[in-house]
Image (cartoon, rainbow, N blue to C red):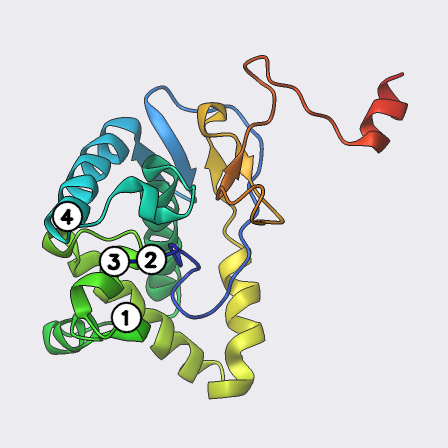
């Protein structure tokens, strides 16, 4: 099986996330609005995700250089943001709608591989399915095709606060630097931009 190149954009909406910097709560990997995503939750989900990859005869190497913890944290953040938007705009997803979303084979022709490409272990997919349905309904509520920009703005209005151990959101993922998050240098690996070097010097 070739690389599944983890999609982990917020569903199919292609949303860019940016993070705020503010004090981090103890034990939190990220705080999204009023929701705290714990490091232990990220670790437990990462274990389940690695097990699901192995079951599908895939490995962490198939993620295109993106660490499993980043894949899982990005998914948990996307779900948290989506659930808060669903609550804000009174959008619900029925069990049947969630079931149907989880059957989507995506570009891989397999619901299981499609979920794995989104950073989701198939055994732990209900929240993800609910978020997918919610995003589709929100976009419809905002005007269908033309609602995509509004949805992106609404999604970006909820800014996650990341634990520095995960770094900061990578604004320009590339082949050389495919990670969802980049090291901010908080732990000794400082790689400042040229403009920052001049400002510091």
State which mark lies toward you, 3 or 2: 3
Q: How crowded is mark 1: few (under 14 residues within 10 Å), some or many (20 or more)?
A: few
In the image, residue 146 sits, relative to residue 109, either above or below, namely below
* Contact? badges 3 and 2 (CB < 8 Å): yes
Q: How crowded is mark 3: few (under 14 residues within 10 Å), some or many (20 or more)?
A: few
In the image, residue 114 lies at what x, y percent?
26, 65
Q: Could you tell me which secondary element the residue under label 4 belongs to? A: helix
In the image, residue 78 sits, relative to residue 114, either above or below, namely above
Which part of the image, by quadrant, shows the N terminus?
Answer: bottom left
In the image, residue 37 lies at what x, y percent?
32, 36
* Mark with earlier residue (3, 1): 3
Q: How crowded is mark 4: few (under 14 residues within 10 Å), some or many (20 or more)?
A: many
* Contact? badges 3 and 1 (CB < 8 Å): no
Which residue is depicted at the point 58% across and 31% down? 21
Gap in angstroms between the C-alphas marked 3 and 1:
11 Å
Gap in angstroms between the C-alphas marked 3 and 2:
8 Å
* Contact? badges 2 and 1 (CB < 8 Å): yes
The residue that label 3 is drawn on is 1
Residue 138, picture quadrant: bottom left
Gap in angstroms between the C-alphas marked 1 and 4:
16 Å
* Mark with earlier residue (2, 1): 2
State which mark lies toward you, 3 or 4: 3
The residue that label 4 is drawn on is 52
* Mark with earlier residue (4, 2): 2
Gap in angstroms between the C-alphas marked 4 and 2:
13 Å
In the image, residue 27 lies at what x, y percent?
32, 22
The residue that label 1 is drawn on is 108
Q: Could you tell me which secondary element the residue under label 2 belongs to? A: loop
**Residue 90 can be seen in this image:** no
The residue that label 2 is drawn on is 4
Which residue is depicted at the point 50% across and 70% down? 151
């Amino acid at each position: 099986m070739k690389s599944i190149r983890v999609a982990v954009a917020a569903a199919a909406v292609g949303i860019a996330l940016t993070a705020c910097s503010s004090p981090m709560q103890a034990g939190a990997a990220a705080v999204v609005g009023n929701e705290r995503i714990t490091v232990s939750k990220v670790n437990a989900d990462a274990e389940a995700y690695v097990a699901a990859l192995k079951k599908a005869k895939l490995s962490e190497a198939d993620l295109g250089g993106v660490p499993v913890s980043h894949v899982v944290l990005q998914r948990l953040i996307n779900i948290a943001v989506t659930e808060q938007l669903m609550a804000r705009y009174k959008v619900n997803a029925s069990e049947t709608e969630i079931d149907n979303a989880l059957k989507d084979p995506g570009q891989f022709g397999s619901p299981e591989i499609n979920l794995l490409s989104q950073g989701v272990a198939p055994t732990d997919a209900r929240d993800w399915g609910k978020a997918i349905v919610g995003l589709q309904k929100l976009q419809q509520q905002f005007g269908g095709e033309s609602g995509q920009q509004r949805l992106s703005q609404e999604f970006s209005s909820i800014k996650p606060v990341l634990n520095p151990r995960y770094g900061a959101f990578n604004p320009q993922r590339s082949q050389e630097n495919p990670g969802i998050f980049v090291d901010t240098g908080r732990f000794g690996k400082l790689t400042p931009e040229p403009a920052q070097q001049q400002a510091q010097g």
